[in-house]
Amino acid sequence: MSAYRIRDWEAAERPRERLARLGAHSLSTAELLAILLRTGTPGEHAVALARRLLHDFGGLPGLHRAPFDALRRTKGIGLAKAAQIKAALELAQRLRLAEWQTRPTISSPQDVAEMLLTEMAALEQEHLRVVLLNTRNHVLQVVEVVRGSVNSAQVRIAELFRAAVQQNATGLILVHNHPSGDPTPSPDDIALTRQAVQAGALLDIRVLDHIVFGAGRYVSLREMGVVHFAD
């Protein structure tokens, strides 16, 4: 049974010791996760358990999306380990958002994706948000508008611009997610975007793009060329 314990490995091969000696970047995702887990199960050391989790849930994005109860019911996990995993993933997301507070402008769809893709791709319902910008495309705030089905019939255009008017934003970018994982815009997505662009022109608020997030991917309607956006 001792062969299944990490503490019986050569010291130079143990994940914690390698992290201390070589840095976190030198470890695989499974090894980093194993450090969080600390222990495995009978016959399965922590690294093997971590590999099984990553395989069964579809990598880190899958672990992020997984309901807490589904994770805690997994063999070898339980309440404590599930909480550790969810806490670590949430800290990673908050770090990403905190880093973005120091980046002054949005200059491309990729910038928006780097800021929001990880979080929004993990949501189990559709969420429609607006990224509010000033004249220099500095991010003022990200505001949630709708949670649930996002289509042109159910979204009130006035709600898209309420926060922008309150904060004197001069531009905005629509963002929403497809829980199916496929970011291809639907006809309703395109119709909603066209309505928003027309309303923005009347309010003198530039609608610069609509970005749809899926599982690790995104689609920019501006880049698709299906809607004529403000410059």
Image (cartoon, helix red, strand yellow):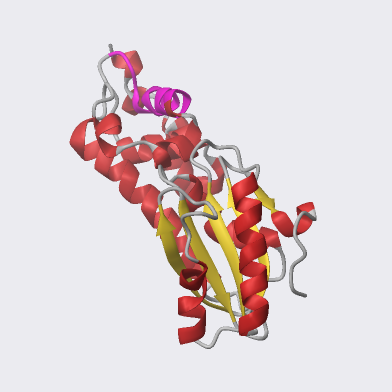
- Which residue is more in the foreground, 128 or 6? 128
What residue span does the magenta drawing correspond to? 43-56
Residue extending furthest front? 153
Where residue 154 appears, as percent x and y from the top left, is 46, 55
- Which residue is more in the foreground, 203 or 178? 203
Magenta highlight: main SS = helix
Instruction: Quadrant for the N terminus, please.
Output: top left
164 to 80, vertically: above or below = below
Q: Residue 113, located in which quarter of the rendered image?
A: bottom right
Q: Residue at x 35, y 27 (%)?
A: 46
Where residue 45 appears, as percent x and y from the top left, is 34, 22
137 to the left or right of 68: right
170 to 64, vertically: above or below = below
Q: Residue at x 37, y 39 (%)?
A: 35
Report if residue 203 is visible in the image.
yes
Q: Residue at x 29, y 30 (%)?
A: 70
Where residue 220 appears, as percent x and y from the top left, is 69, 54
Residue extending furthest left? 79
- Which residue is more in the foreground, 144 or 44? 144
Does the stretch in magenta take in 53? yes
